[in-house]
Image: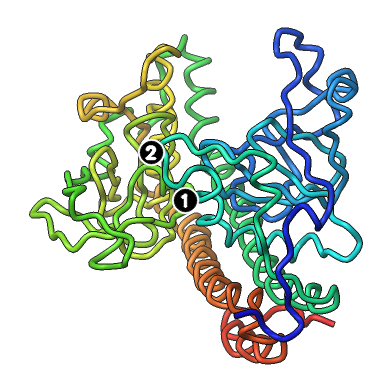
């Protein structure tokens, strides 16, 4: 039941609905310009989409002028991968998998964004109810209903939820900076000295006391177990299970009561690597979760730190990926890892690096854990606020209690 002052409105009444389009790809002059070209991978959990993998040129923009979005347009993915949302920050374009709303003045874009994040089941119903390839047409999307209070209530709700998301985004940016610092130190201390030594010695030498050796000297490798998919559930029965799709967002979407004899519980701070697709090592910041097959964890041995192991395996991971062709599915096998060679510096240098880099990594993990707590608070408040079940003053009190221990948030005015 909607709260007092809330009423159901169809999306088509909230503003102009626009379906994106891709300019002809045969002409490269249509791309590489000032306009973000937003596709589903760019809708990666950020509220405001301020950077994209691809851009549109002035020439491409002229071709797509009927699909141009101003800043503040609210986007929703509606084909194949549905339910991904974001808000434009400047004039932008999307591809045809995304429907957008250019809001009327009585609709707050950030409030509408939060409403969109709750539309997954409505989208599935509009797209055919669970088909393998979901396609929510523009017309069906436009007929979906949301609860709409007054513009003042919308702004207040968006401010509360936005303050939580702003803190999460601040933590994300802080972690990016911390990782860049740690990586720069690693490069300065280990990559550049070995590169310089090899240039002086015809590509063969290393600084005195350094050597190249097996990854197993610095870390143990634990492989994921083949948990039974028949026992997977979304009802939080058992413990969460990490699959490759969960590495980037650190949010496992299935649980299992199974306790596999070869199972490993990933803990915050572990280095997790996917073994299918694009290879990348992740610093896990989610909750303790089972490690599924086609994933592995690198556990540093005494004398070696997580940042040292993480940045040491970056090069061999890239080398394995480079040996695969673009037309095949990329797999990382145990035989590949067995061949990983890394640079082993003298103990004194390793110890100095560890003293500097380990606190940075601990801060990264702590920020991720704080963000997970904030996200849980946001997700519990969101449906109650946008339905009118919980009103703004009560939500502010909950936020004040829940967020004060995490460094506080700006108060909505």
Q: Circle 1 — which element?
A: helix
Kindly indicate whether the residue at mark 1 contacts the one at mark 2 (C-beta within 8 angstroms): yes
- Which residue occupies the foreground of this view, 290 or 407? 290
* Rendered image quadrant of residue 25: top right
Image mark count? 2
Q: Quadrant of the C terminus?
A: bottom right
- Which residue occupies the foreground of this view, 272 or 132? 132
* Rendered image quadrant of residue 82: top right
The residue depicted at 66 percent of the width and 63 percent of the height is: 115
The spot of residue 353 in percent (x, y) is 47, 51
Q: Is residue 5 above or below residue 319?
A: below
The spot of residue 87 in percent (x, y) is 75, 51
- Which residue occupies the foreground of this view, 357 or 399? 399
- Which residue occupies the foreground of this view, 138 or 72? 138
* Rendered image quadrant of residue 57: top right
Mark 2 or mark 1: name the one nearer the start of the chain: 2
Q: Quadrant of the N terminus?
A: bottom right
Marks 2 and 1, how far apart at CA: 10 Å
Dot 2, crowdedness within 10 Å: few (<14), some or many (≥20)?
A: some
Q: Circle 2 — which element?
A: loop
Question: Which labelled disc corresponds to residue 345?
Answer: 2
The spot of residue 185 in percent (x, y) is 56, 45
Q: Is residue 280 above or below residue 365?
A: above
The residue depicted at 54 percent of the width and 70 percent of the height is: 379
Question: Which labelled disc corresponds to residue 79?
Answer: none
Q: Is residue 116 above or below residue 124?
A: below
């Amino acid at each position: 039941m909607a709260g007092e002052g809330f009423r159901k409105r169809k999306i088509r009444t909230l503003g102009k609905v626009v379906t994106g389009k891709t300019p002809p790809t045969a002409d490269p002059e249509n791309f590489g310009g000032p306009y973000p070209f937003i596709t589903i991978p760019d809708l990666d959990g950020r509220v405001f989409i301020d950077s994209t993998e691809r851009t549109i040129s002035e020439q491409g923009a002229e071709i797509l002028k009927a699909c141009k979005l101003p800043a503040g347009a609210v986007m929703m993915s509606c084909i194949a991968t549905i339910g991904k949302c974001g808000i434009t920050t400047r004039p932008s374009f999307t591809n045809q998998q995304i429907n957008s709303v250019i809001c009327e003045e009585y609709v707050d874009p950030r409030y509408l964004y939060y409403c969109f994040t709750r539309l997954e089941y409505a989208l599935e119903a509009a797209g055919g109810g669970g088909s393998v390839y979901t396609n929510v047409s523009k017309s069906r999307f436009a007929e979906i209903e949301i609860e709409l209070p007054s513009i003042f209530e919308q702004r207040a709700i968006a401010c509360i939820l936005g303050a939580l998301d702003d803190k999460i985004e601040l933590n994300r940016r802080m972690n990016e900076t911390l990782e860049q610092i740690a990586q720069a130190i690693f490069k300065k201390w280990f990559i550049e000295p070995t590169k310089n030594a090899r240039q002086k010695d015809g590509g063969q030498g290393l600084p005195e006391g350094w050597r190249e050796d097996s990854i197993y000297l610095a870390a143990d490798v634990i492989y994921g177990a083949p948990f039974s998919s028949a026992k997977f559930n979304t009802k939080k029965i058992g413990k969460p299970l990490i699959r490759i799709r969960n590495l980037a967002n650190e949010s496992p979407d299935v649980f299992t009561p199974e306790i596999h004899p070869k199972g490993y519980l990933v803990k915050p701070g572990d280095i997790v690597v996917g073994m299918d697709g694009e290879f990348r090592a992740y610093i896990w910041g989610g909750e303790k979760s089972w490690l599924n097959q086609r994933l592995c964890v690198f556990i540093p041995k005494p004398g070696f730190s997580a940042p040292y192991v993480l940045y040491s395996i970056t090069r061999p991971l890239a080398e394995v990926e480079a040996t695969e062709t673009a037309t095949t599915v990329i797999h990382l096998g145990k035989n590949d890892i067995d061949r990983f060679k890394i640079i082993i510096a003298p103990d004194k240098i390793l110890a100095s690096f560890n003293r500097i880099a380990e606190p940075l990594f601990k801060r990264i993990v702590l920020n991720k854990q704080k963000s997970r707590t904030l996200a849980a608070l946001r997700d519990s408040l969101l449906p109650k606020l946008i339905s009118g079940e919980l009103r703004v003053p009560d939500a502010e009190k909950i936020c004040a209690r829940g967020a004060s221990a995490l460094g506080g948030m700006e108060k909505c005015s």
